[in-house]
Amino acid sequence: MTTATVVPAQAGIHAEQIWAWLGEVPDPEIPVISIVDLGIVRDVQIAGDGAYDITITPTYSGCPAMQVIADAITEALHAHGVAEVRLHNQLSPAWTTDWMSEAGKLALQGYGIAPPAQQVIDISGLRGGARAAVSRRAASSTPRIACPHCGSAHTEITSQFGSTPCKALYKCLACREPFDYFKCH
Amino acid sequence: MDDKVNYLLRLGDNALILSQQLSQWCGKGPALEEDMALTNVALDLLGQTRMWYEYAAELEGAGRDEDTLAYLRDAHDFKNCLLLEQPNGNYADTLVRQFYFDTWHYFVIEGLTRSSDARIAAIAEKSLKEVTYHLRRSGDLMVRLGDGTELSHARTQNAVNELWMYSGEVFAYDAVDEAMVAAGVAPVADELRAHWLAHVAEILAEATLAMPSADAWMQKGGKQGRHSEHLGYILAEMQFLQRAYPGATW
């Protein structure tokens, strides 16, 4: 029995190249930020059979954009000549806004959405002190959110939920403009 | 039915029925912000439902999927607690139902992050941050309505009293729940109940609302498929399309 050398179907395409192409796929809800900058793409692996295994994670459990994102990834890679793409959905570790890139945060700001203002809810802390995590004091100690339009920190929350699950509604008390805030998550 | 499949369906059914109820407020909320908040919460719960159903269907291995579980079961096969099928009523009724559920949901999901079943722990980890927002919001609103106007106080107090008898079913463990506790899958009822009572007491006190007796008689039966008449109406609307046009897809 001879051992045949396995030649990947897309020999020469490295994982770095795949990451770069995925970095051009926009988030369907907020097109100024890519799915890589948003932290949705978790892993790219080249399998022995020449296929590419892409691992993604949902932002929120019910995010309706996930199917669109999965389709967009497959479509983008096919357009670059990658024939075999396998998508994997990963739940743990759960997505966090800490995975959002600095470039992504700047893009959000320029788009009129205030980026996450602090490190997120620490899940390990929640496990230890369950009651403290939901106390109203903890909720009210959230940081001042700067207005993405005029930069003023003189803002207040209008609603804990905005146009999508990942955002809250704020208004600026200086320039009087309402704005979306991308919640720490 | 396998105990774990049953337990997963209970988690999924609670989330789905409440999600469906909240969706009925879409376009009819008392304020735009509330309309959006309720539909956002409904969306989170729907996403969580899919994760529980997907796992239940895989374990069961009977060829069902999340769609057949949602759309092709009749009322007696649903295992949601009676609290979730109570009518939306006025906004205080909707809010108090949400607050009772969110408080239990937060502590049970938090407990499930330590489940001996890795898949359940991962779903719980994913859900916990969402559920934390839900509980913060419903606690804040309880205080605003309870400690609000004379009318909002009266309606909220009425809802607190009327829904109280449905708040204990989640802690009434049967053989299925106990088997999950024994396997290290689910958290113990007594601990959950102690956390629930403490948090509800704290919020109700701040909201200037009187708390009913913790020893009051509690309704149960939903987990075993014995439902009130309300569930049939909810399912009739939710399942209409698949019942009238079997197999219809987008």
Image (cartoon, coloured by chain):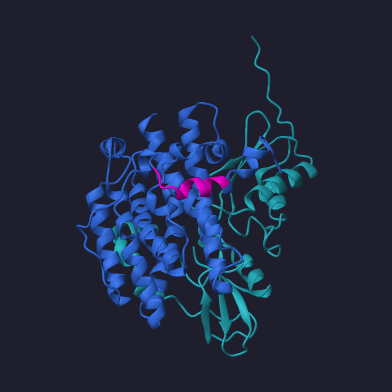
The shade of chain A is cyan
Residue situated in front as seen by the camera: B19 or A145: B19
Q: Find the residue positioned furthest to the front.
A: B229
Quarter residue A12 falls in: top right
Q: Which chain is blue?
A: B
Residue B200 in the image, given as x and y percentages of width and height: 29, 65
The reply to whether residue A95 is in sight is no
Q: How many numbered badges does the structure rendering display? A: 0
Residue in front for this viewpoint, A154 or B36 = B36
Q: Main secondary structure of the magenta part?
A: helix
Judging depth in this view, the residue of B212 and B121 nearest the camera is B212
Q: A126 left or right of A149?
A: left
Q: Residue drawn 57% across and 62% down?
A: A100
Percent x, y for residue A97?
Answer: 53, 62
Residue placed at 63% from the left, 84% from the top?
Answer: A177
Is the N terminus of chain A in the top left, top right, bottom left or bottom right quadrant? top right
Residue reaching furthest to the left: B215
Q: Position of residue B241 (x, y in %)?
A: 65, 43
Left or right relative to B198: residue B135: right
Decide whether residue B234 is among the magenta residues.
yes
Q: Which residues are magenta?
A: B227-236
- Is residue B120 magenta-colored? no
The residue lying at 30 percent from left, 74 percent from top is B209
The picture quadrant where one finds residue A37 is bottom right
